């Protein structure tokens, strides 16, 4: 009974002291909220959804109330995904300054494999799906539209849920070595058409060597479609 009475008296006596201390010091939680708002204001929301996490401030730090308003500034030139360092300061007559770190994560919808895809597989729409993904530490590019990846060839096996990037894909072969093609040579005012034979494989837009069936001359052009090679005069 005596112990409980002492504890109660101690609690009642300590309340004003705690209240007084809080009135003269900044709330760490408020500083974190202001820091988060500051960082969010620097981000471009059109890139996706950002999640900002502010580190906890050492509870031993008693920061005096800042009458002139707390100031926030990045230590780097611009904000980035991943770790950022923030200078938090009070420019009043009794100034203080601390540094805190913040993690910025970026989530957006990206194209991923809807099922396991084997090497050499030509991608179709049903192989792909959109998925909300954390791309904070994604080193390679990504697609946000299925059409950007459809008909491409898979370079290596992909598992369900793997993010599809340009590094995983290559263009399908449009013209194969030995195919008969039409060679079109254009210049201002005229066009020459001739037959030829492809001497190497090529995807759309790639360089290809062809032999003129009539003159046997070997020339180089651009693969336009499965039957046409365009040559510059």
Image: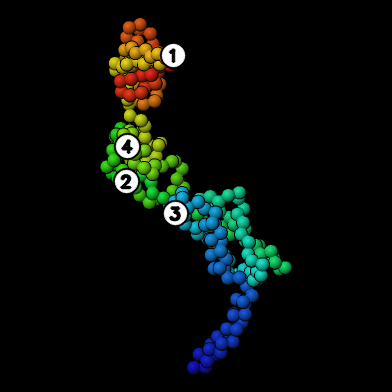
Of labels 1 and 2, the one closer to you: 1
Residue visible at 39% across and 24% down? 206
| Residue 204 seen anywhere in this rendered image of the structure | yes
The circle drawn on residue 150 is 4
Q: Position of residue 116 (x, y in %)?
A: 29, 42
Which one is nearer the viewer's eye here, 123 or 121?
123
Residue 28 against residue 138 in the figure, above or below: below
Q: Residue furthest right?
A: 93
Read off the residue under disc 3: 49
Q: Could you tell me how far apart the alpha carbons at marks 1 and 2 are, in whole angstroms?
A: 45 Å
Q: Residues within 10 Å of mark 3 (few under 14, many from 20)?
A: some
Residue visible at 63% across and 64% down? 70
Q: Secondary structure at mark 3?
A: strand
Who comes first in sequence, dot 4 or dot 2? 2
Q: Could you tell me how far apart the alpha carbons at marks 1 and 4 are, in whole angstroms?
A: 34 Å
Q: Position of residue 30 (x, y in %)?
A: 55, 68
């Amino acid at each position: 009974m005596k112990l409980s009475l002492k504890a109660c008296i101690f609690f009642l006596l300590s309340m004003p002291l705690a209240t007084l201390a809080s009135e003269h010091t900044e709330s760490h939680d408020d500083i974190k909220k202001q820091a988060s708002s500051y960082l969010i204001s620097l981000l471009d929301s059109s890139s996706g959804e950002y999640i900002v996490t502010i580190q906890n401030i050492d509870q031993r730090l008693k920061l005096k109330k800042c009458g002139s308003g707390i100031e926030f500034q990045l230590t780097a030139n611009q904000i980035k995904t991943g770790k950022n360092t923030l200078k938090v300061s009070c420019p009043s007559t009794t100034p203080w300054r601390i540094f805190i770190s913040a993690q910025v994560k970026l989530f957006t919808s990206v194209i991923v494999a809807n099922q396991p895809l084997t090497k050499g597989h030509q991608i179709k729409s049903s192989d792909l799906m959109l998925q909300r993904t954390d791309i904070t530490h994604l080193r390679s590019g990504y697609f946000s539209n299925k059409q950007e990846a459809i008909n491409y060839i898979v370079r290596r096996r992909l598992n369900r849920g793997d993010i599809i990037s340009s590094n995983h894909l290559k263009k399908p072969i449009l013209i194969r070595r030995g195919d008969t093609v039409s060679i079109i040579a254009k210049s201002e005012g005229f066009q020459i058409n001739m037959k030829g034979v492809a001497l190497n494989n090529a995807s759309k837009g790639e360089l290809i060597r062809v032999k003129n069936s009539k003159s046997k001359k070997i020339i180089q052009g651009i693969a336009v479609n499965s039957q046409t090679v365009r040559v510059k005069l």
